[in-house]
Amino acid sequence: MPEKKLMLTIKNKSFWDRAGMIFFAASFLFVVVMLAVVAVQNRVAPFGEFINILEQNLWGLPLAVLMVAAAIIAEVARYTNLLYQTSGRVMPLTAFRVAMYGRFVDSLSPYMWGGRGFQARYLNRMNDNLAVSYTIPYIQRFIKQVIFNLLFAVFFLSVKIDNNDVALVIKILVYISLLYRSFLPLTFLVFTINERFGRMLLIGSLAVLYRLRIVKDYHAFFDRAIRYVDDVLYAIKHEIKSLASMVIMILGVIVEFMASMSIPFFLYIAVGGDMHYSYILVLYMYSFVAAQAYPTPGGTGLAEFAFYAMFLTYVQSEMLFWFLLMWRLFTYYIYIFIGFTVAVSDRRKQKLPLLPGIVRAKK
């Protein structure tokens, strides 16, 4: 990628400051409270009975594990592709560490947005090219957000579910979340078509947010937004150098989407469920998207509530506690565990693996 002096800088900030610890503690507390509520409101099957149910539906749990692995592999493949585009070298281990480190910080950040900056700082410690370090995580996030939004729209429109299965508050949160998730992709699209109109649209949107007191410093936020849009569009233009690379990115996102959204279905089968795949898939999508509107780490609190509300009538009451616990372990805590392991491993080594290919390619 041609050299470009980015206006944005990577802040040398540790996640393990007071705010990070508070978010982590709040996340854990929310889950404990929600599980306690489920346990009080429903008879919880003894652990032995739970194991017997799993044994009767033996293929559900292994397939859920396979979906977790498929989602991770798809994400690592995208990072491997981006690293190859910038360095000319295939580095799947580095891609895995970057992907899991981002997932780890995302899981402990409001709106799951913290991982990009920490991935950028992680990469920047391994090479001296800030442009490369900054753009790799944000290209991946941008493409993922666009494809995820499109797939959500396709499934919501094509699979009809009973209105009684989706509470009004969940629907409202889904609409808010989709609007929020679509703002940046639509901004990029408008800027690509007509930059002048894009700036006018951004100014108008920020003016509304400023009047609603959602944005405190209008001018500072506008400057950051313009720089962010400029940097990501520049990165996509120069980093995605071939049609094959873009196809890999898109297919990787689709595989990750289908795998991650399918995890609850196979857990549902494991606890004795018998509803159709597409119906369970869309029920989970409603709860997943709704949770994105909540500012706690990983949507914790609302995520459990929405998931519980969506599946309350489809899972045996005595298995609800175990179903909720397995879902959260397979879709949330597993990434905290893997990411924490990666972070501790790097810390113990006292040095990060080098990316000589990236550095040499830019000299």
Image: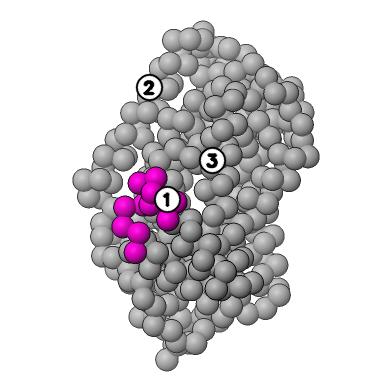
Q: Quadrant of the C terminus?
A: bottom left
Is 240 left or right of 100, judged from the image as shown?
right
User: Amino acid type of disc 1?
Assistant: Leu
Q: Which numbered disc covers residue 209? A: 1
Query: Where's residue 165, x and y in %?
Result: 66, 22
Looking at the picture, tell me which residue is in the foreground, 254 or 203.
203
* Marks 1 and 3, how far apart at CA: 14 Å
Q: Residue at x 54, y 50 (%)?
A: 181
Q: Which segment is the magenta one?
A: 207-219
Helix, strand or loop under label 3: helix
User: Amino acid type of disc 2?
Assistant: Val
Query: Where's residue 34, x and y in %?
Result: 42, 22
* Marks 2 and 1, how far apart at CA: 33 Å
Q: Are marks 2 and 1 in contact (CB under 8 Å)?
A: no
Q: Which residue is mark 2?
A: 33
Is 285 left or right of 37, judged from the image as shown?
right
